[in-house]
Amino acid sequence: MTSQHVSEPSRRRFIRIGGLTGAAAFVAACAPSASPPPAAPASGAAPAPAAKAAWEQQWDRLVDAAKQEGKLAVTFTGAGAGYRKIGESFEQAFPGVTVEVTTFASASLFAPRVIQERNAGVYTWDVAALSINDTLMSLIPAGAIDPIRPVLFRPDVVDDTVWHKGFEFGFADNAKKWGYSYNWYKQGAILVNTDLVRDGEVQSARDLLNPKWKGKIILADPRTIGSTSVPLTGIRLKLGDEVVKQLLIDQEPVISRDVRQLSQWLAQGRYAMGYGVTDAILDDFKAQGLGQNLKHIDIPEAIIPQMTGIYAMNRAPHPNAARLFVNWFLTKEGQGIYTRNALLNSRRKDVPIIDPRLALDTTREYEHIGGTEAFLEPHRKTQVMARELFK
């Protein structure tokens, strides 16, 4: 503390303070005079910048640390060029960090590879966007995933008011810590070729059992790929196992794990309808003039709200870049980039709906929600049934 020099009070000064006596008078006399008001800033001078909040300082340090690592490896369960564009957007937002994006049609294809690599002492990925199914059943027991709750710190990410159904709803596992669900969309519509399917011919799951469609339905493999097994689970829960068995056996659908190939076949008009074909892939074919006659038709019994979670990989090779990406991805900016490229709706209220057809009623309480631990057992039962049927 800077010291202040106080001159010795004179006799004349004591007389002027009249009513004060003794020590009190001395203290009053010795008190320093009021400091002059601060000089007004010169015209046009910029005001001093406000001190950054603690989280902003933390964010700045994280950005610097991520740039020192220089790389990020992230995987998405999905297909299409849009996911790589998400990585490119992150690179533009944080120059100096190179993003390597890989995609898998299903978490069931990603999980075995991760476990095999880890057994060999190889740690490739930093962040993964996955369904909860194989994450809970294999990756977490294998120690391949770290809890994501401690990773989230930005106020605009943990804000309860910006998420449909609140922030906590995004933790889809019962422990409320492993992954965070960022999207929220309706799954269950079947994609039909309108040259082969007339208006009104397919309105329910039972219509799919019409002998007319035998051998004319394509499905992404329901034993492993959720874009088929999730709507089939909805049908099974509402209409019973037999309807699903008839669809998978009697209708002789074409089954494949190559989602791009299925999309191409449907776009070319080789089949009448199918499950498991994504808009992100179809857009690639539509740009070539294919698939203009394709249309989504809701199958009421198959409709299931669906969510996907983002997970932090254990022993990530670039932990700071991973933490930066997770927080950025869940911001308004990150989710806007995600929806525009993946063509799926975000749970964030401040991000515009990208596909009204997939929009869910946020005021409704759904009995079953895909991508949650509660949905894990009925979904697993559908996949087991498919494996038994296809033996």
Image (cartoon, helix red, strand yellow):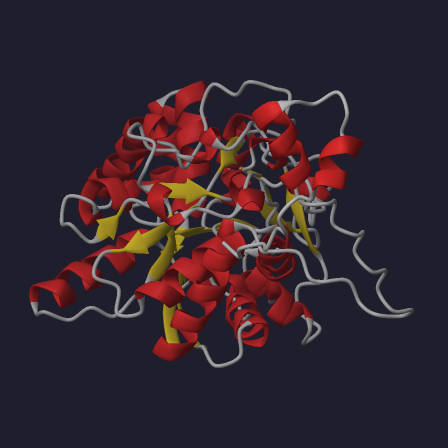
Q: Which residue is drawn at 60% across and 56% down?
A: 51
Q: Which residue is drawn at 45% across and 19% down?
A: 238
**Image height of 116 relative to 221, above or below:** below
Location of residue 232 (image quadrant): top left
Query: 337 left or right of 16?
Result: left
Q: Please count the marks in the image.
A: 0
Viewer can see residue 101: no
Q: Which residue is drawn at 61% across and 51% down?
A: 6
Query: 122 left or right of 312?
Result: left
| Residue, far right | 43
| Residue, far front | 11
- Residue 81 is situated, as x and y percent measured from the top left of the image, at 54, 71
Q: Nearer the viewer, residue 294 or 217?
A: 294
- Residue 391 is situated, as x and y percent measured from the top left of the image, at 18, 46
- Residue 309 is situated, as x and y percent measured from the top left of the image, at 41, 45
**Image height of 172 relative to 223, above or below:** above
Query: 134 left or right of 21?
Result: left
Q: Residue at x 15, y 50 (%)?
A: 143
Q: Nearer the viewer, residue 55 or 134?
A: 55
- Residue 337 is situated, as x and y percent measured from the top left of the image, at 62, 60
Location of residue 14 (image quadrant): top right
Q: Nearer the viewer, residue 131 or 269?
A: 131
Viewer can see residue 209: yes
**Image height of 2 relative to 42, above or below:** above
